[in-house]
């Protein structure tokens, strides 16, 4: 009996020991200096808190954090950290953020309660960010921080971070507030894993940007946020001027924005002419219940603007692998686009041809605008291609390059008319085949599913006449997107985000992150 009792007591002791929580520690930096904060961080382990006192300091060295901690100041205006860390030279060498966190799941991190003021200029637009956040953590939070006098991007993310950035203020000089990349989603590179995984709108499997204020970062060429590298973002309950989502194009091998939910925001134009309220170049998602405000002409290309930059310009490696000339346009030859493989017309350019306008040798044989839609013209002699804008009996006008690439037709140039649709990662497309490698393999259509963009309940100066303005004949209403139509079956994720409620209970880990090979 005594022996049995001893075993019971021993089992109870082990159970109590295993179930007890490891007590987190708090370390307070001696001052606001980078060296003192780094010293406190060096003592901390996962789950601990590092407190920065109420003071001000200029930092010239990057703070590197590789453990899941809370970094906590004494509030905006009380703890002031001035970023004089070098932001890069002409080759973007020596470009560093002020604060760098790299934390992997299951650990989490939290950054809160101070002013981060820019000082060192990002002269060469190297964009290291004032903060660089990376890793695979699924429950991060950055809140109650004022990014004042931004000299570079406020926050730049890498990896596959999930969580929330909330109650922050971003103010600078024509710099993005936040750049989101999910370039290692599922363990793959370049955002390939994100593009090969399910979309999962309405879940926690996004980076949430909510209840923030963006002022000058919303100016020309920047936007409150930019997204690429397979990024997935929810942007809600913010005030800003405009937002941007990159495509799979000018960022070279990096893939475009994968998915987005944009709702309950107020966008107010602050420039005499801004391109659009939301400038979207790839992926799928929902846009609803936003207010767009301007003087009636600021958003000169539409409130919501959908575009496919590979219609008009070429970006390696998205043409033939190892190809010469100017590879990368969606012109019927890109191996990752869906091409018909047919040459519909061919010939040579006459001496009457000019930039963006082919006049074919021979008599007119084409119907007016016969080649408008998914057709592209390829200048075989020069090695470039572009979407066809219009045609007459013996002439074709192609769209001009938005990136100042050569689109001149010279007498005797050989041409081919080909067709491609959809282009890889274009607006209205979702999950597809898994690619890998710096030159993507395998080659062949990525077979991305049709996942239209839906927009509804958006207003422009109080009027509900908002429509998506497509800049591409490959992005078509009631196919790639639906105006004034609620997405069937869609329910937004709870607002405010559970991480902002201080419950200490993060959302369930993301599911279905594994990419599929098709």
Image (spheres, rainbow, N blue to C red):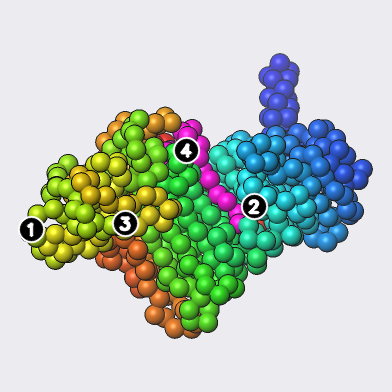
Q: Residues within 10 Å of mark 1 (few under 14, many from 20)?
A: few
Q: Say if residue 442 shows up in the picture.
A: yes
- Quadrant, the C terminus: top left
Q: Residues within 10 Å of mark 3 (few under 14, many from 20)?
A: few
Does 31 appear in magenta? no
Magenta-highlighted residues: 176-198
Q: Say if residue 26 shows up in the picture.
A: no
User: Which one is earlier in the sequence, the residue at label 4 or at label 2?
Assistant: 2
Find disc 1 in the rendering and name its residue. 363
Disc 4 to disc 3, C-alpha distance:
35 Å
Disc 1 to disc 4, C-alpha distance:
48 Å
- The spot of residue 279 in percent (x, y) is 46, 62
Find disc 2 in the rendering and name its residue. 153
What's the mark number on residue 355?
3
Q: Is residue 200 above or below residue 149?
A: above
Disc 2 to disc 3, C-alpha distance:
37 Å
């Amino acid at each position: 009996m005594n022996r049995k009792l001893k075993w019971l007591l021993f089992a109870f002791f082990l159970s109590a020991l295993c179930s007890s929580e490891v007590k987190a520690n708090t370390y307070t930096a001696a001052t606001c200096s980078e060296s003192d904060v780094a010293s406190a961080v060096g003592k901390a382990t996962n789950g601990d808190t590092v407190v920065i006192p109420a003071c001000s300091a200029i930092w010239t060295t990057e703070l590197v954090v590789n453990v899941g901690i809370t970094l906590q100041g004494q509030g905006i205006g009380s703890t002031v950290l001035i970023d004089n860390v070098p932001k890069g030279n002409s080759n973007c060498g020596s470009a560093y953020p002020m604060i760098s966190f790299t934390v992997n799941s299951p650990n989490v991190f939290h950054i809160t309660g101070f002013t981060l003021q820019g000082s060192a200029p990002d002269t060469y637009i190297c964009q290291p960010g004032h903060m660089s956040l990376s890793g695979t953590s699924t429950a991060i939070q950055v809140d109650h921080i004022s990014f004042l006098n931004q000299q570079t991007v406020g926050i730049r993310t890498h990896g596959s971070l999930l969580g929330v950035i909330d109650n922050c203020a971003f103010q600078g000089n024509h710099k993005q507030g936040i750049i989101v990349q999910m370039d290692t989603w599922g363990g793959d590179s370049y955002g390939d894993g994100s593009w090969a995984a399910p979309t999962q709108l309405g879940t926690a499997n996004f980076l949430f940007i909510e209840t923030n204020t963006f002022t000058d970062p919303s100016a020309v060429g920047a936007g409150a946020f930019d997204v690429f590298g397979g990024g997935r973002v929810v942007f809600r309950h913010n005030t800003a001027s405009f937002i941007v989502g990159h495509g799979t194009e000018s960022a070279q091998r990096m893939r475009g924005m994968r998915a987005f939910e944009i709702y309950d925001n107020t966008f107010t134009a602050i420039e005499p002419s801004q391109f659009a309220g939301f400038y979207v170049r790839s992926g799928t998602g929902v846009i609803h219940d936003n207010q767009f405000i301007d003087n009636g002409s600021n958003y000169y290309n539409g409130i919501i603007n959908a575009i496919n930059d590979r219609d008009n310009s070429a970006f390696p490696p998205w043409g033939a692998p190892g190809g010469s000339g100017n590879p990368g346009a969606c012109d019927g030859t890109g191996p990752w686009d869906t091409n018909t493989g047919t040459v519909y017309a061919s010939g040579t350019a006459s001496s009457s041809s000019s930039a963006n306008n082919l006049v074919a040798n021979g008599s007119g044989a084409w119907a007016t605008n016969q080649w408008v839609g998914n057709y592209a013209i390829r200048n075989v002699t020069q090695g470039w291609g572009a979407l066809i804008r219009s045609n007459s009996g013996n002439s074709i006008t192609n769209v001009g390059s938005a990136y100042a690439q050569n689109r001149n037709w010279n007498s005797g140039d050989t041409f081919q008319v080909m067709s491609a649709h959809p282009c890889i990662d274009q607006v209205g497309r979702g999950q597809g085949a898994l690619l890998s490698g710096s030159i993507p393999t395998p080659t062949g259509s990525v077979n991305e599913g049709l996942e239209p963009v839906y927009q509804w309940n958006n207003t422009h100066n109080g009027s509900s006449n908002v429509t998506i303005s497509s800049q591409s004949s490959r992005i078509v209403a009631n196919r790639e997107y639906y105006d004034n139509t609620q997405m069937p079956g869609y329910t937004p994720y709870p607002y405010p985000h559970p991480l902002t409620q201080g419950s200490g209970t993060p959302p369930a880990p993301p599911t279905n992150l594994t990419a599929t090979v098709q």
